Image: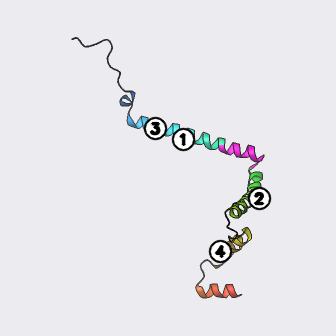
């Protein structure tokens, strides 16, 4: 039986593209999709919060985040967790005693 010379079987496209070119194309498409998704997310956050600048968004987040944290802790029955002020005091203490010996830290704590 004669072979069908006029209609050869299709060759897969992936075998004809060099692997480096295929990897470059995949990286470019992935980077573009990632950048687009991040841009849409940030634009959505600005739209939902009604912010017109980054400073305004940060100010709203500083007010909103602790309130939501407290709501979450209350709903989970975690009333014993440190408040924002206690966490801030702890952070200031940690910064103040960084690099001190135990004796120096004890003197700082007592005084």
N-terminal of the pair, mark 4 or mark 2, is 2
N-terminal of the pair, mark 4 or mark 3, is 3
Point 64% across, 79% down: residue: 97
Report the predominant secondary structure element of the magenta stretch.
Answer: helix
**Residue of label 3:** 24
Number of numbered discs: 4
**Residue of label 4:** 95
Identify the disc placed on residue 86. Answer: none
Point 65% across, 74% down: residue: 95
**Label 3 element class:** helix
N-terminal of the pair, mark 1 or mark 2, is 1
- CA gap, disc 1 and disc 4: 39 Å
Quadrant of residue 19 within the rendered picture:
top left
Where does residue 11 sit, x and y in percent of width and height?
Answer: 35, 24
- CA gap, disc 4 and disc 2: 24 Å
N-terminal of the pair, mark 1 or mark 4, is 1
Which image quarter holds the N terminus? top left
């Amino acid at each position: 039986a004669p072979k069908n010379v006029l209609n050869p079987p299709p060759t897969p496209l992936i075998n004809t593209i060099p692997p480096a070119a295929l990897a470059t194309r995949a990286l470019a498409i992935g980077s573009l999709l990632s950048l687009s998704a991040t841009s849409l997310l940030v634009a959505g956050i600005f739209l939902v919060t009604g912010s017109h600048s980054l400073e305004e968004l940060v100010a709203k987040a500083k007010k909103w985040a602790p309130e939501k944290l407290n709501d979450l802790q209350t709903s989970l029955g975690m009333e014993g967790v440190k408040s924002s002020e206690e966490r801030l005091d702890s952070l200031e203490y940690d910064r103040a005693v960084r690099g001190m010996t135990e004796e120096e830290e004890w003197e700082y704590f007592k005084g």
